[in-house]
Image: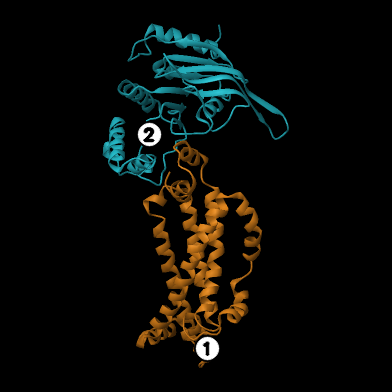
Chain colours: A cyan, B orange
Amino acid sequence: MSVDIESRNVWKAYQLDDGKTLSVLEDFNLSVAQHELVALVGPSGCGKSTLLDLFVGFQRPDRGSITFAGQPVVRPSSKGILITQKGSVFPWYTAWHNLTLVLNGMSRQEATERARHYLELVGLHEFADVFPHQLSGGMLQRLELARALVVKPEVLYMDEPFGSLDALTRLRMRQELQRIRREEPQTTVLVTHDVEEAIALADRVVVLSERPMRITRIVDIHIEHPRSMADARAVALKDSILRDLGAIGD
Amino acid sequence: MSGTRIFPGPWDVVLGTFALAKGGVLLHHVAASLMRVAVGYLGAVALAIPLGVAMGWYRPIHRALNPMIQMLRPISPIAWIPLAILWFGVGNASPIFLIFLSSFFPLVVGTIAGVHSVERQYIRAGENFGITGLKLLRHVVVPAAMAQIVTGMRIGLGVAWVVVVAAEMVAINSGLGYLIIDSRNAGNRYDLVVAAMVIIGVIGFGLDVLMRRMERVDSVRWRYVR
């Protein structure tokens, strides 16, 4: 398996207003293989979002290196697209326009085909002319996903992508993501609070500590898809990860 | 006191309105005022929105120009009348200049505020997809700020309509402002004065209704839903 993204000896700290320093990452190492889905779980505020910002290129590490396919990441680009809970689909454009806008320097015909393909992949082909505010929460996240995939990124970064959805829609989005991955595998880094979501989707779950963020444990998940959370192995995994996170006592 | 020369009654005003409407006098004055507002206001829109976007987006431009804008803004356009006449004479150019001034500042300030309030996630998304420079302004920053720009346009047009009447009271012989002054000067026709005031109110209301329609355009409305 070839390594796609790598964080090597990365340090990152913030200068606070009161003059103190907030150390988020100290000598952090993680690599993600091509087409792998790695889920990051950890206490809130531990630095997961900072790590994603570094991976995407919104921020630069103080020390160490972030590389993508061996090349250092210096600025955001469509090679690695970030999806967040807040959502960033442009509400002033239709679903269709959101997709075609991000297809820079592509022939019209090619762009049209691409946009059509990805709207169909996420099941929104009938909503091409609809404005985002007319879509439901789940559809909005699917549009978000379609817009990310339409540029064929090498890596997809998802920061609590389904965090603002209701429990039922969340479950459905989980299955949707799994189905899309089966059709078009995609290197993915998924940050989530939801241990079940991590187990349901990930090839590896990285359990993280409080700030400064360290890897407590990496759990390989070998359960075949589609995964049931009632599966004894899943239950045991969930239990042990929650124990790592201190959410349940010994 | 109603019905006397100082307090014309409603019926006097209605009759006055008909008297004005007859023979196209009223239409002539309304058209003159609307034309001045259209030219001055559209000129302000054309200049203030790009300037506001530039000031809102580029910090150095904001730092350089904002103090001047904030100092000029509280000066009533009426205070400019002597200078306007000195510079532009007694034709149409003076009131147009005053209207331009009056709507320019609300437009600039509204646009700057709009650009400053653009949510970070949209700008980050733009950068993430490699949308930069003018394309980012055109497809992300300006549309995201559009709701506030439209609010600035509404306020600007309202002020312009207020100012046109004042501007036409000096050194000009057409328009609703002139009609008011002329009605008084030519025989203290206060019924016509009030009739003109009512018409000013009605047209102002109509202009605002038109502007509010812009808020219902799909690419603007998202700000008001949810």
Subunit that carries the residue with mark 2? A
Crowd rating for badge 1 (residues with CA inside 10 Å; few <14, some 14–19, many 20+): some
Say left or right for B180 vs A127.
Answer: right
**Is A180 situated above or below A250?**
below
| Disc 2: CA contacts within 10 A as few (<14), some (14-19) or many (>=20) | many
In this view, the mark in front (2 or 1) = 2
Identified at 44% across, 7% down, the residue is A236
Q: Which residue is mark 2?
A: A151
Counting every numbered tag in the picture gives 2
At label 1, the amino acid type is: Arg
- From the viewer's perspective, is residue A117 above or below residue A91? above
- Mark 1 chain: B
Q: Which mark is residue A186?
A: none
Give coordinates of residue A167: x percent, y percent: 40, 25
Q: Quadrant of the C terminus of chain B?
A: top left
Mark carried by residue B184: 1
Q: Is residue A19 left or right of residue B2?
A: right
Residue B85's place in the image compared with A39, above or below, is: below
